[in-house]
Image (cartoon, coloured by chain):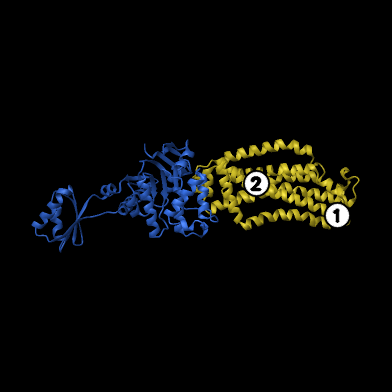
Chain colours: A yellow, B blue
Amino acid sequence: MKKMVAIMHKEWLELRQERWLVASTLLMPLLLTGLPFAILGNATAETTNLGPIADLPMFEGFSTEETIQIVLLRQFLILFLLMPLYLPSTIAAHSVVSEKVSHTLEPFLAGPVHTLEILLAKSLVAAVPAALITWLCYAVYTFGARLVVVSDRVHTEVFTSAWLLAVILWVPMLAMLSVALGVIISSRTTDPRTAQQLTKIVVVPLLIFFFAQLAGLLIVSTTIVVVTLLPLLLLVACTLYAATRLFDRERILLHWG
Amino acid sequence: MPAISARGLTRTFGELVAVDNLTFDIAQGEVFGFLGPNGAGKTTTIRMVTALIAPTAGACTVAGYELGFDNHKIRRAVGILTEVPGFYEKLTAQENLLFYTAIYDLDADTARTQIRHYLQMMDLWQNRDQKVGTFSKGMRQKLAVSRALLHDPQIVFLDEPTAALDPQAATVVRDVIRRLRDENRTIFLTSHNLHEVEQLCDRVAIFRRSLLYLDTPQNLRARLFGLHHVVEFSHGAHDWLTLVQSWPFVQEVQRENDNLVVSLQEPETQKPKLIQMLVEAGAQIQNVYERQYSLEDVYLQLVNDEEHTATEYAEKSK
């Protein structure tokens, strides 16, 4: 545990001084959080045609303007599940690339530190900020939306307790899943930057979720969040386990060191 | 029990045999020089013995721990100065070392004491709050030596410790190596500075994929070149060449300008006899001395011989 704390502390000290990395990491969440408001500002009944989506039973009783806002605000919620998948890969890749560039992998791996300690510490350093940034952006999105919605019931319809629960519970797990998948992919590539690019494929399953929600086939409910929690937790645990088994010090040293 | 004992250590990378059937023992407290040309497999050997990469074949014990089974204990027992002394550039010297004290499980008080001790020893204490990115090559190398010693390892691997150092800094590092030797620590040293190796090492291994020779520097010299006496004449060394060649106790004689270089069967007793017989024959001798071969001569001879053999072998195989 002490070594994990030491690794995490060292990573934090380094990250703190990487201003460009912090700025570029924050840029995407800031844009994704601001983008919906820019689109919402131009989405009126005259400019937006929702087509058959507007006729779905779930929108019964809502005005056209309200329906447009509900559809748009709800679609952008998916971004808060993409963020924890995307952000850790940037931080984790930087962590490995900087070790490679500064030739610190060899003295570090020569020390009496277990693979699991290295893996967990580096994963947490990438996953924790990703989860915190996502939660912060979600909070900004929720409170910002309150200022632009045409009625309170739009806000109530979009920002449900189920979504709040999903963001609180799913985000850290998705962040850890992203890092663990990154490690697995990295263990089969020879370059950390290639690994970072390949890691982005973890967003693909979420696109299915996105389109299912767009088509009205899937509504995030408390039941769905609770039911998926255990399988997701198991998936994260299995992926982390596989990552630990596949994380090969020798391969990392010889190919990346 | 030897500090390090390797038996048939081999490492291949695909078709390439980087280290082939390496066998040696290093005693506790010994300074062991490991010499070889670039690409000979020295770094691969160090990486295997320090449990950084696994051997393809063979066995090795380090500090009593078996490679492949007790890797974590081996890593704890050894200190390593890597060929490239990498540091976290944006952290200070002290922050870098503090990180490694935590990795090696040192408590906070010991960590502070050790960091102060080694930074002062390396004349870097005044630079402790400076970011390593601003350090010169020499400062980084000295900091890397400090890092290798922080946890007081019994076995220390130093991969070219004085490379890139100015003479003053190199002297500091050599003094540290002598101090470690006095503390009975085992040192595995690679260097291209053969004078340094000769000064510091108890035994030297000359290595190129496999072990070519392993002995003390003195024995290596004697074994390879024998003992030669140089006889300097006032003039006319060629006049005496045939005569000296005819004497039965002379193994070999060659002329070099106004000198004769003589190899004797029993130098201690036959050297006075050689001088006496030459004087009696009328030779005007200016000086007689023993030719000193450096470790560099030995190294170049061995590596060139091995290169020659390899080339011959390759040509025959065509």
Helix, strand, or loop for circle 2? helix
Label 1 vs label 2, nearer the camera: 2
Q: Examine the rendering and report whether any part of residue A191 can be seen.
A: no
Q: Which residue is mark 1?
A: A48
Label ID, residue A127: 2
Q: Quadrant of residue A121?
A: top right
Name the outermost residue toward the bottom.
B235
B151 vs B195, left or right, is: right
Secondary element type, mark 1: loop
Which quadrant is home to the N terminus of chain B?
top left
The x, y position of residue A112, in whole percent, is 50, 42
* Amino acid of disc 2: Ala
Left or right of B120? Residue B256 is left
Judge left or right: residue A235 versus residue B309.
Answer: right
Disc 1 is attached to a residue of which chain? A
Q: Chain of mark 2?
A: A
Please, which residue is most extreme toward the front here? B109
x 65%, y 46%: residue = A127
**Place of residue B78 in the rendered image (x, y in percent of width and height, measured from the top left):** 44, 43
Can residue A225 be seen in this snapshot? yes
Quadrant hosting residue A17: bottom right
Give the Cα distance between marks 1 and 2.
Answer: 37 Å
**Tag 1: residue type?**
Thr
Figure check: B280 above or below A80: below
Q: Is residue B316 above or below residue B285?
A: above
Task: Tell me the crowding category of disc 1: few under 14, some 14 to 19, or many 20 or more residues within 10 angstroms, Cα based.
Answer: few
Rate crowding at label 2 as few (under 14), some (14 to 19) or many (20 or more) other CA atoms within 10 Å: many
Q: Pointers 1 and 2 in contact (CB under 8 A)? A: no
Residue situated in front as seen by the camera: A218 or B89: B89
Residue B7, percent across and down? 39, 38
| Residue sitting nearer the eye, A99 or B177 | B177
